[in-house]
Amino acid sequence: MNLHIRCMEINFEIFEFDRNKDELSEKEIQYLDTLDVKTVQAIIDHCTNKYNYYNAIQTGLKLILNSIYGAFGNEYFVCSTKDIAGAITAMGRDVVKYMDNINETYWYEYWHEDYELHEHLGITGDVKPIDSSWIHRLSKTDHEGEVSQTEMEDGEYQRKVPVSNYVDTDSLFVGFNPAMQSCDWQGDEQEFVWKVSKFRLEKLFKTKLKNYAKKYHVENIQDFELENINESILFVTKKKYIKHTIWEDGRQYDRLANIVPKGVDLIKKGTPKFAREKVMDIINYLFDNPKTYNIKDLLKFVRDLKKEFEMTNINDICPGANINAYWSSKIMVDGQIIDAPGIVEDKETLKVAKGTYYTVKAAGLYNHLLYQHPELVNTYQIIKPGVKVKIYPCIHDLNDKFCYILGSFTPEFAPPVDYDELFQKTVAEQVNYYLEALELPKLNKRLKIIVSLF
C-alpha cells in the first residue's frame, strides 16, 4: 500500500496541527494506538511533507517580499521609488523600537507584580524588581537620569541589567536571565522561557501591536511570536552574531549541536584544516561555558593548541593560495621605464620588483632556492602561473614568506617555519575576534595577554 492510499484511510480531523505543541493530546494518542506501525509512519511522513511544503511557501513569500522591497530601492528598477523603500524601512524600524519599549516596560515595571504569571510558573517566593538603571557602555559607570533615544541608538549607554539584548530588523532578542534571577528560579530554564512567552509575552505583544495599528487606522497583521530559544548568543558587531540555538520552530536540539552564525563567517575563507577544526573547538568552549568562561582557561586552551599545532603536518596548518602571475615586465611610468610588480630574477639572485604581491614573493623564494639545488630540479617542479601552493611565514634573509606546490613539500631546502607568526595569523587572530566581542583582553603573537592601560 503506497503512502497516498494509506493516508486516505487516516482521519486527520483527530489531530490538531500546531507547530508550538509540546506533545500529543490524549485523544490523539488513543487514535494512534488503534493503528499499525506502518500507518503511524505514514502519518509522520505525511506531516513532514506538509511541513516542508508550507515552510517552502513561507520562505518563497519572504523572498518575494524582500525582492519587492529591494527593487523599489534600486535606482535601475523601472518602477524604482525610494520613498516606498524608505517608508518600509522606517516603519519596520519604528515597529521594532515600539516592541522593544513594550518588552522593557513589562520587565522593569510589571514583572515583579504579575502574580497571575507567578502562579502559572509555580513561584511561591518573593519576586524582586529588575534593576532598570543605565550605565555608560565603555566605562561601565552608573548614569543618573534619563537616556535620550539618540544616546540609546548610538550605543553610548546601556541598561545595567538588560532584558532586550539586541534588536534586529524584524526580531527582538529577549533576555530571560534577569527574570529567573529575580525569582530565584530553580526549574528548567527552557520551560521558564516557554511558559512566560506563551502565557504572557505573545499575548501582550499581540495586544500592543493591535493598538499600534489603530494609530494608522489599519488592521494589524504583525505578529511577534517565539521563534527560537538560545542558550546564549555572542554578539560580535551590529548585525553580526552567533547563536547557540537549542529550540527552533518546534524542533529541539542537543547542546552545542546547533551553532548558528548570522552575518559572520565562523571560519574565515582559506583557513587551513587544523585551524578550521580548532577555532570551532574554541567557539564550542565559549558556548559550553557561557557563564564561567575566563581568559585564564582560554589562554591555557590556546597554548595547548599551539603545542599541537607545531607537531601537526605542515600541509594541515598552512593556508592555500593560487599563483596567478609571476614574472615582472617593463612598463613606462612618467617617462621612465621601470619593473612592474613581479619577479625580475630568480636564478643567480632573487630580485623582486616594488609592489609585488606576497604570494609571488614567496613563489620567487621557492624557485630561487630550488635553483640553488640543481640535483633537485628534476625532483620538484618550478612554480609557474596557475599553480596552487601552500604558503607560510618563514625565517630567511631573502623573504619572510615561503610557498611550495600543493602536496609537494620540499624539506631539502624549505626554510624554517615561523610557527609564532603562522599560529597568530591562522588561529590567534580569529580567537581575538571573539575575545574582543566578549570584552576580554587579546592575545599577542607570544600568546601573552595584551592589557590596555587606558
Image: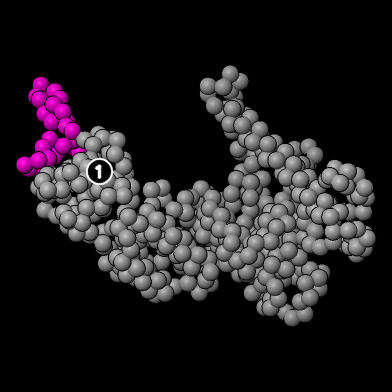
In the depicted structure, whether residue 308 falls above or below residue 45: below
Give x and y (percent) for residue 299.
37, 71
Residue 195 appearing in the image: yes
Does the segment drawn in magenta span residue 236? no
Residue 226 appearing in the image: no
The picture quadrant where one finds residue 219 is top right
Of the pair 318 and 5, the residue shown nearer to us: 5
The residue drawn where x is 72% and y is 51% is 224
Give x and y (percent) for residue 65.
66, 34
Q: Residue furthest top?
A: 78
The residue drawn where x is 37% and y is 74% is 300
The residue drawn where x is 41% and y is 50% is 268
Does the segment drawn in magenta span residue 346? yes
Left or right of residue 97, residue 313 in this image:
left
Task: Tell me how the rendering is colored.
Answer: one colour
The picture quadrant where one finds residue 147 is bottom right
Of the pair 191 and 331, the residue shown nearer to us: 331
Pointer 1 residue: 359
The residue drawn where x is 68% and y is 56% is 248
In the depicted structure, whether residue 278 falls above or below residue 187: above
Amino acid type at circle 1 is Thr
Give the residues in magenta. 327-356
Give x and y (percent) for residue 297.
42, 74
Per the image, label 1 sits on a secondary structure element best described as helix
Left or right of residue 76, residue 31 in this image:
right
